[in-house]
Image (cartoon, rainbow, N blue to C red):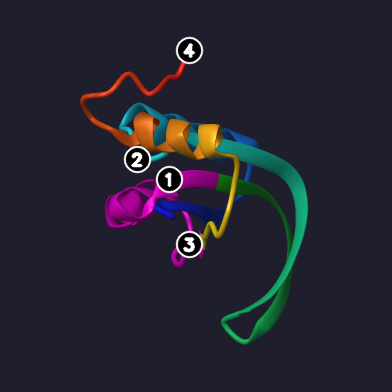
C-alpha cells in the first residue's frame, strides 16, 4: 500500500485552507480534509496549554511525504508543527487508485 494519511494541526481554518490549497495545487496531497473546532491539550515550554485548532487530514503517498513535510513546515506558523504520517493498511481500490493518480505530476489527478 503506497497511500498514507498525514495529520497536522493548525491554529485556524484560514491557515488550514491556505496550507491545503498549496499542498493540493503542488500535487503534494490528493485531498486535505479540514476539521475545525478540535480541542487540544498539550505541554509546551513547561506549561499545560489548551487551544482550539483545526485538524488537517491529508491523503498522499509515501514517495511525496518528505516534500509534503518540508512544505508544511515552510508554510506553518507553529514553531514545531504536528506532521504525523500513518500507514494505510487497506481501502477501497478505486479511491486508492485515485490518490495515486492525483499525485502524478504528469497525470490529471482525476478518474472522472
Q: Is residue 88 magenta?
A: no
* Residue that mark 3 sits on: 85
Mark 3 Cα-neighbour bin, 10 Å: few <14, some 14–19, many ≥20: some
In this rendering, the label closer to the viewer, 1 or 2: 1
Q: Count every numbered label the image shows and give the total.
A: 4
Residue situated in front as seen by the camera: 88 or 30: 88
Cα–Cα span, label 3 and label 2: 13 Å
Element type at marker 2? Answer: loop
Residue stretch rendered in magenta on the structure: 58-86
In the image, is residue 70 above or below residue 31? below
- Dot 2 or dot 4, earlier in sequence: 2
| Callout 1–callout 2 Cβ contact below 8 Å | yes
Is label 4 or label 1 in front? Answer: 4
Mark 3 or 2, nearer chain start:
2
Crowd rating for badge 4 (residues with CA inside 10 Å; few <14, some 14–19, many 20+): few
- Compare marks 4 and 3 and give the one earlier in the sequence: 3
Disc marking residue 80: none
The local secondary structure at tag 4 comes to: loop
Q: Is residue 12 above or below residue 49?
A: above
Q: Position of residue 14 (x, y in %)?
A: 58, 33
**In this view, the mark in front (2 or 4):** 4
Q: Which residue, given by chain and number where applicable, does mark 2 sit on?
A: 28
Would residue 93 appear left or right of 26 to someone viewing this image? right
Mark 2 → mark 4, Cα distance in angstroms: 20 Å
Q: Residue furthest front?
A: 93
Q: CA distance from mark 1 to mark 2?
A: 7 Å
Check whether the beta carbons of the residues at disc 4 and disc 3 lie within 8 A of each other: no
Q: Residue at x 32, y 48 (%)?
A: 71
The first of marks 3 and 1 along the sequence is 1
Reading the image, the residue beneath label 1 is 60
Query: For mark 4, what is the residue?
Result: 112
CA gap, disc 3 to disc 1?
9 Å
Amino acid at each position: 500500500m503506497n497511500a498514507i494519511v498525514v495529520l497536522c494541526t493548525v491554529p485556524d481554518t484560514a491557515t488550514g485552507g491556505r496550507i491545503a490549497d498549496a499542498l493540493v495545487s503542488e500535487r503534494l496531497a490528493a485531498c486535505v480534509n479540514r476539521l475545525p473546532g478540535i480541542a487540544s491539550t498539550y505541554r509546551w515550554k513547561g506549561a499545560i496549554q489548551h487551544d482550539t485548532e483545526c485538524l488537517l487530514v491529508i491523503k498522499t503517498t509515501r514517495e511525496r511525504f518528505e516534500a509534503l513535510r518540508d512544505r508544511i513546515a515552510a508554510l506553518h506558523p507553529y514553531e514545531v508543527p504536528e506532521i504525523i504520517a500513518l500507514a494505510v493498511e487497506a481501502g477501497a481500490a478505486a479511491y486508492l487508485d485515485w490518490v495515486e493518480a492525483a499525485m502524478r505530476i504528469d497525470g490529471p489527478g482525476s478518474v472522472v
